[in-house]
Amino acid sequence: MLMSDYEYFELKYLEEIFQLFRNCQEISKYNNIDLLLHTDDNFMDIFDLLFDSIELPEEDEEPEGEQEEY
């Protein structure tokens, strides 16, 4: 069973996006900025923004440097 693009992105990047969110919260606290510090702020909003902003390559596509020449 193949996983969807969303599941692949989540599996690969969820932890890094969560860490990015936590780092941004710490920077906001340090600089006395009220960014990402509200109770309704959620790292999944950043996750969804990033997922909606990218285009994942198809599985059958080879990276540009690995394409065979005929």
Image: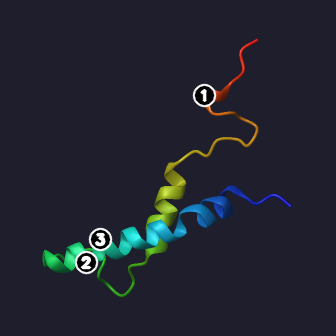
Q: Are marks 3 and 2 in contact (CB under 8 Å)?
A: yes
Whether residue 33 sits left or right of residue 63 in the image: it is left
Whether residue 15 sits left or right of residue 62 in the image: it is left
Q: Which numbered marker is on residue 26?
A: 2
Is residue 59 visible in the rendered image? The answer is: yes
Vertical comparison of 2 with 38: above or below:
above
* Dot 3 or dot 1, earlier in sequence: 3
Which amino acid type corresponds to the residue marked 1 in the rendered image? Glu
Marks 2 and 1, how far apart at CA: 38 Å
Of 69 and 2, nearer the camera is: 69
Q: Which residue is mark 1?
A: 64
Residue at 71% in and 15% down? 69
SS class of the residue under badge 2?
Answer: helix
Q: Which residue is mark 3?
A: 24
Q: Point out residue 2 in the picture as x, y percentages from the top left corner.
A: 81, 58
Q: Point out residue 53 in the picture as x, y percentages from the top left corner.
A: 49, 50
Q: Which numbered marker is on residue 35?
A: none
Vertical comparison of 44 with 51: above or below:
below
Vertical comparison of 56 with 41: above or below:
above
Q: Quadrant of residue 61?
A: top right
